[in-house]
């Protein structure tokens, strides 16, 4: 089958891109011909489709003309629409699978896809289909003010980087795409990696057909390591307020363990300043790591912590750590409890509660045999439920349903 995959970034920027590339590799392994549509960027991985990619869109580049240009592309990108039409004409895919396309590509491409008569599925990586700012977070806390199409609340709350102008633009985008053009109505079926996200977008009033299909992890090259080389724990992810990293830093204060903070983001400098001012010598910042360097840090440690204070979807960090045989402590937020099953694959605590998180960490540090038991159960979970072949068979059923026009029959 010829499958066209679209995502706005063609390099590993985060979990969405990781899922995008591993899905492409999985499909290739099963003999499918994979085509790509994305945005031009010097960081892009090598590919044969760069000539079809849209020009780079940088929302932070200074200059009035750039701001006007990117504003129009956010609302409706005619370049994206033309380029994907050209790609479809030249390469003739049989189905299109969209991932994270908002803003830099825009859902304008759906008009070209449907004009070519192609079925289309779309993976939901966040809450953009129901939330003007995509994250359902305001001031670091969950927000559902956009429920039932009340997107104007994004402007009144200045949800997008505290800016009235940027928030207004996102409000216009939402009403244009949903109420005027009904672009998302052109998608045959949406894929949700977590049951929580699926239920939440429906609860918020989303009308599209949404099916549950969790992320997967390649197991063959990964040998689980149930012991550890050092008394350390890891946080892996973006350093932003809603991720709860400050709660974690406060929770480990005074504990006999090293916290390795792996990742980067807008609050990194303030976190490092806080650690320095409070003389927390057991917190280390590593910046962004991937590949073997990231694996080594996780495997050397005892377990990971995911302290999110927003509605996480289906965090790959947890799945990959489980594959390494490492359990996790996580907050009861979003899709996290679907992976971290309390007392089985890790421990759960109340989001934002420093003392409860501290007690959870201390309980595992005091009972190291439990860490290995939880790690084995975590590895078993990914083998039994999140293995590549399981994912592939379910994804093929979704594709076939979209192609045959029977997406409504999917559960």
Image: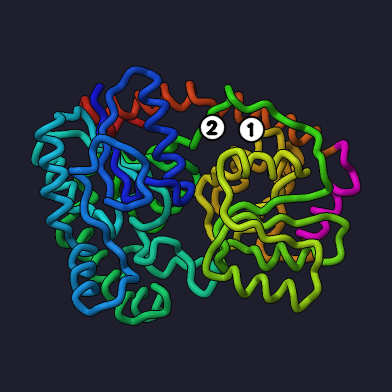
Question: Looking at the rendering, in which quadrant would you find the C terminus?
Answer: top left
Question: Looking at the rendering, in which quadrant would you find the N terminus?
Answer: top left
Q: Which residue lies furthest to the right in this view?
A: 366
From what the image shows, is residue 109 above or below residue 215? below
Residue at the spot of label 2: 217
From the top left corner, tell me how far across and down residue 41 is, in percent.
Answer: 31, 53
From what the image shows, is residue 95 above or below residue 294? above
Label 1 secondary element:
helix
From the top left corner, tell me how far across and down residue 222 is, in percent.
Answer: 62, 27
The Cα–Cα distance between marks 1 and 2, rounded to whole angstroms, is 7 Å
- Point out the tag, 1 or 2, that comes first from the N-terminus: 2
**Residue 354 location, quadrant:** bottom right
| Local crowd size for mark 1, using a 10 Å CA cut-off: few (<14), some (14–19), many (≥20) | many
Q: Can residue 52 be seen in this view?
A: yes
Q: How many labels does the image show?
A: 2
From the top left corner, tell me how far across and down residue 350 is, in percent.
Answer: 69, 59
* Horizontal side, residue 57 vs residue 288: left or right: left
Asked whether 226 falls inside the magenta stretch, the response is: no
Q: Which residue lies furthest to the top in this view?
A: 31
**Residue 106 location, quadrant:** bottom left
| Local crowd size for mark 2, using a 10 Å CA cut-off: few (<14), some (14–19), many (≥20) | many
In contact (CB < 8 Å): disc 1 and disc 2: yes
From what the image shows, is residue 308 above or below residue 301? below
Label of residue 157 in the image: none
Label of residue 323 in the image: 1
Q: Which of 257 and 340 is in front in this view?
A: 257
* Horizontal side, residue 240 vs residue 37: left or right: right
Label 2 secondary element:
loop
For image coordinates 40% across by 46% down, the residue present is 11
For image coordinates 44% across by 40% down, the residue present is 19
From what the image shows, is residue 179 above or below residue 343? below
Which region shows up in magenta?
A: 357-369
């Amino acid at each position: 089958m010829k499958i066209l995959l679209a995502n706005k970034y063609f390099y590993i920027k985060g979990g969405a891109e990781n899922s995008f590339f591993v899905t492409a590799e999985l499909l290739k392994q099963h003999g499918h011909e994979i085509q790509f549509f994305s945005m031009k960027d010097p960081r892009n991985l090598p590919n044969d489709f760069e000539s079809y990619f849209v020009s780079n869109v940088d929302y932070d580049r200074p200059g009035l003309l750039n701001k006007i240009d990117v504003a129009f592309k956010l609302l409706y990108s005619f370049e994206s629409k033309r380029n994907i039409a050209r790609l479809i004409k030249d390469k003739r895919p049989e189905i299109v699978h969209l991932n994270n396309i908002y803003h830099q590509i825009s859902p304008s491409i759906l008009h070209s896809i449907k004009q070519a008569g192609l079925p289309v599925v779309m993976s939901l990586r966040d809450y953009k289909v129901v939330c003007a700012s995509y994250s359902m977070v305001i001031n670091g806390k969950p927000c559902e003010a956009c429920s039932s199409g009340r997107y104007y609340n994004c402007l009144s709350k200045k949800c997008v980087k505290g800016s009235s102008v940027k928030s207004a633009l996102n409000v216009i985008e939402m009403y244009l795409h949903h109420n005027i053009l009904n672009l998302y109505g052109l998608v045959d079926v949406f894929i949700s990696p977590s049951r929580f996200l699926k239920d939440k977008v429906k609860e918020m009033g989303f009308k599209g057909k949404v099916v549950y299909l969790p992320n997967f992890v390649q197991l063959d090259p990964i040998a689980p390591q149930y012991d550890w080389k050092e008394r350390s724990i890891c946080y892996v992810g973006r350093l932003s307020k809603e991720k709860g990293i400050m709660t974690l830093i406060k929770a480990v204060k005074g504990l006999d363990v090293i916290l390795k903070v792996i990742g980067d983001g807008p609050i990194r400098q303030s976190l490092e300043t806080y650690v320095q001012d409070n003389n927390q010598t057991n917190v280390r910042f590593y910046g962004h790591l991937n590949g073997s360097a990231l694996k080594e840090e996780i495997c050397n440690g005892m377990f990971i912590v995911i302290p999110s204070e927003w509605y996480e979807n289906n965090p790959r960090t947890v799945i990959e750590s489980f594959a390494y045989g490492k359990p996790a402590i996580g907050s009861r937020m979003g899709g996290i409890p679907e992976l971290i099953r309390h007392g089985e694959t890790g421990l759960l605590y109340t989001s934002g509660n420093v003392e409860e998180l501290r007690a959870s960490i201390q309980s595992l540090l005091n009972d190291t045999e439990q860490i290995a038991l939880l790690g084995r159960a975590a590895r078993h979970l990914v083998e039994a439920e999140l293995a590549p072949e399981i994912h592939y068979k379910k994804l093929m059923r979704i594709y076939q349903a979209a192609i045959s026009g029977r997406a409504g029959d999917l559960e």
